[in-house]
Image (spheres, rainbow, N blue to C red):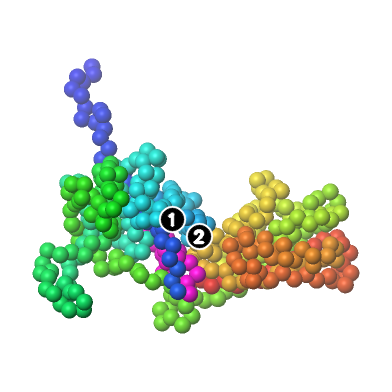
C-alpha cells in the first residue's frame, strides 16, 4: 500500500547550486613592447587567462565558465584556452568598453543559456586562484546575497593633497577587496541592470552594495594579487619560467602526382595538369609543417592525430591540421618562432606562388609573414620528384615553450 505521507524527497530541491564562473578578460592594453594584451601574455608558463579557467574547472567539475573578451580577441582567446574548450563548457562573450559593461554582457550571456543559482565574477589579472578561497565564498552564499575576498590594510593610510598630508586615516575596518566576487545570480544581474551609467563602482561588490544587497567579507589570499604586467617570453628575465627553451621540429612528406586531382600546396590551389593524391587534400607542404610543429613539441605525427583511415579526413583542407598543431603549441603557453619550408618538385614552378603560400601559412598560424620561409628546389630531373611522379616537402619549425 502506498505511503500517504509525501516523501521529503518527492520534489527534490537541488542540494548543489548551479554555479557559473564569469572571468573578465577584455582588456585591450598592450604592455610596452608586449605582443599581446596582458590577459593573453605568458604568466608562469601559460597565457594568464588560462590559469583562472583551469582553477575554476579543477574546483568544480562541470562548472559553466564564461570568459568575457575584448572586440577582436576571439582567435587569441581560443589559442590561449585551446584544449580546455573541448573538455569543459567554456563560452566566449565579447565585452564592452567599461568593465561594468563587460560584466553585464557576461551575466546576460549566462541568463541566455538558462541562468544559474550562483555566479563567481573574477578578473583574469588575478591568476593564482585557490580552491580554498572559492570554498569560503561559496559557503558564505548560504546566508548572504554576495561575498567577496578581502585582506587587511597593512600600511598606514594617509589622505593627501598637492603632495601634503592632510589627515591620517584609521586603518581598522578598512579592507582591500579582491576577486572572485560571488553572488546569487538573479540578485547581481538585477543590480547590474539597475546600475546608473555614471556609477563610480569599480567592482561588483560596489554594484551589489549600491543595490542594497548584503555582501559578506571572507578571508582573501595574498596570492590573488593583481598581476599588472604579464610577460611575453623574456630571455633576460631572472624568472626561469619566462626564459623559454627553444625547440626545433622537422617534418617531411611526399604525395603522388596524378591526373584528375586538384593541386594544393601550402594551402594555395595551383593550376596544373596534375594534382596530389593521398591523405586529405594531400598538401605536402602543410603536412610537413604540421609534422614539424608536432615534432618540436614531441607530440607524435600527423597520422596519429588525423588517421588516414578515418573517412572524415578524406579531401579535408589541411589547414585544419596545421591550425590544430599550432593550437597545441599555444595550449602549452608556447609561441611559434618561425617556419622554414622547402617544396621539392620539377613542375609546376613554385616561384610565382611563393608569396601567396607564405601569406596563407602565416594566416593559418596567426603569425607575421616574415616568420614563414618558403623555398623551392628541383632535383635536377633526378629521382621521383625529378621524373614528376610526386612532390616532396620538408619543413623546420622552431617554437619557444616554458621549461
Ligand atoms: Mg601527407
Answer whether labels 1 and 2 touch (C-beta < 8 Å): yes
The quarter of the picture where the N terminus appears is top left
Location of residue 121 in the rendering, given as x and y in whole percent from the top left corner: 31, 53
In space, the residues marked 1 and 2 are separated at their CA atoms by 9 Å
- Is residue 45 rendered magenta in the image? yes
Mark 1 nearby-residue class (10 Å; few <14, some 14–19, many ≥20): many
Residue 237 lies, with reference to residue 116, above or below; the image says below
Q: Is residue 2 left or right of residue 365?
A: left
Q: Looking at the rendering, which quadrant does residue 38 occupy? A: bottom left
Residue 217 lies, with reference to residue 211, above or below; the image says below
As helix, strand or loop, the secondary structure at mark 2 comes to: helix
Q: Looking at the rendering, which quadrant does residue 97 occupy? A: bottom left
- Is residue 110 rendered magenta in the image? no
As helix, strand or loop, the secondary structure at mark 1 comes to: strand
Say which residue appears at 58% left-offset and 57% top-offset. Answer: 324
Q: Which of the labelled discs sits on residue 193, or is there none?
A: none
Name the residue nearer the viewer: 136 or 73.
73
Residue on which disc 2 sits:
76
Say which residue appears at 64% left-offset and 68% top-offset. Answer: 369
Say which residue appears at 55% left-offset and 76% top-offset. Answer: 246
Looking at marks 1 and 2 on the same chain, the residue that comes earlier in the sequence is marked by 1
Location of residue 107 in the rendering, given as x and y in whole percent from the top left corner: 35, 46
Visible in this render: residue 363?
yes
Location of residue 148 in the rendering, given as x and y in whole percent from the top left corner: 23, 56
Mark 2 nearby-residue class (10 Å; few <14, some 14–19, many ≥20): some
Residue 87 lies, with reference to residue 8, above or below; the image says below
Visible in this render: residue 120?
no
Name the residue nearer the viewer: 208 or 230.
208
Residue on which disc 1 sits:
69
Q: Is residue 317 left or right of residue 4?
A: right
Which residues are the magenta region?
33-52
Amino acid at each position: 500500500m502506498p505511503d500517504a505521507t509525501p516523501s521529503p524527497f518527492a520534489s527534490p530541491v537541488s542540494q548543489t547550486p548551479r554555479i557559473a564562473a564569469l572571468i573578465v578578460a577584455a582588456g585591450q592594453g598592450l604592455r610596452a613592447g608586449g605582443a599581446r594584451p596582458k590577459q593573453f601574455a605568458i604568466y608562469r608558463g601559460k597565457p594568464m587567462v588560462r590559469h583562472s579557467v583551469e582553477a575554476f574547472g579543477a574546483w568544480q567539475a562541470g562548472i559553466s565558465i564564461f570568459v568575457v573578451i575584448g572586440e577582436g580577441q576571439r582567435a587569441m582567446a581560443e589559442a590561449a584556452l585551446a584544449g580546455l574548450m573541448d573538455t569543459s563548457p567554456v563560452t566566449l562573450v565579447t565585452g564592452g568598453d567599461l568593465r561594468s559593461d563587460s560584466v553585464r554582457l557576461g551575466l546576460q550571456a549566462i541568463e541566455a543559456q538558462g541562468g544559474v543559482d550562483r555566479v563567481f565574477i573574477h578578473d583574469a589579472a588575478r591568476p593564482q586562484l585557490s580552491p580554498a578561497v572559492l570554498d569560503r565564498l561559496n559557503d558564505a552564499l548560504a546566508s548572504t546575497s554576495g561575498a567577496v575576498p578581502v585582506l587587511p590594510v597593512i600600511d598606514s593610510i594617509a589622505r593627501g593633497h598637492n603632495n601634503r598630508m592632510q589627515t591620517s586615516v584609521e586603518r581598522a575596518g578598512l579592507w582591500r577587496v579582491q576577486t572572485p566576487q560571488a553572488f546569487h545570480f538573479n540578485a547581481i544581474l538585477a543590480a547590474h541592470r539597475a546600475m546608473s551609467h555614471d556609477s563610480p563602482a569599480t567592482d561588483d561588490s560596489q554594484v551589489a552594495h549600491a543595490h542594497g544587497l548584503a555582501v559578506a567579507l571572507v578571508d582573501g589570499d595574498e596570492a590573488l594579487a593583481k598581476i599588472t604586467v604579464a610577460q611575453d617570453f623574456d630571455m633576460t628575465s631572472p624568472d626561469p619560467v619566462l626564459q623559454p627553451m627553444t625547440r626545433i621540429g622537422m617534418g617531411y612528406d611526399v604525395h603522388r602526382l596524378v591526373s584528375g586531382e586538384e593541386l594544393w600546396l601550402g594551402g594555395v590551389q595551383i593550376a596544373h595538369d596534375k594534382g596530389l593524391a593521398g591523405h586529405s587534400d594531400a598538401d605536402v607542404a602543410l603536412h610537413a609543417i604540421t609534422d614539424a610543429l608536432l615534432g618540436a613539441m614531441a607530440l607524435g605525427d600527423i597520422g596519429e592525430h588525423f588517421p588516414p583511415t578515418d573517412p572524415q579526413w578524406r579531401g579535408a583542407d589541411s589547414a585544419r591540421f596545421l591550425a590544430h598543431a599550432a593550437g597545441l603549441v599555444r595550449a602549452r603557453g608556447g609561441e611559434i618562432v618561425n617556419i622554414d619550408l622547402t617544396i621539392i618538385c620539377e613542375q609546376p614552378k613554385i616561384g610565382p606562388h611563393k608569396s601567396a603560400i607564405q601569406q596563407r601559412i602565416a594566416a593559418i598560424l596567426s603569425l607575421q609573414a616574415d616568420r614563414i620561409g618558403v623555398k623551392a628546389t628541383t632535383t635536377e630531373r633526378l629521382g621521383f620528384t625529378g621524373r614528376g611522379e610526386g612532390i616532396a616537402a620538408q619543413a623546420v619549425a622552431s617554437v619557444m615553450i616554458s621549461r
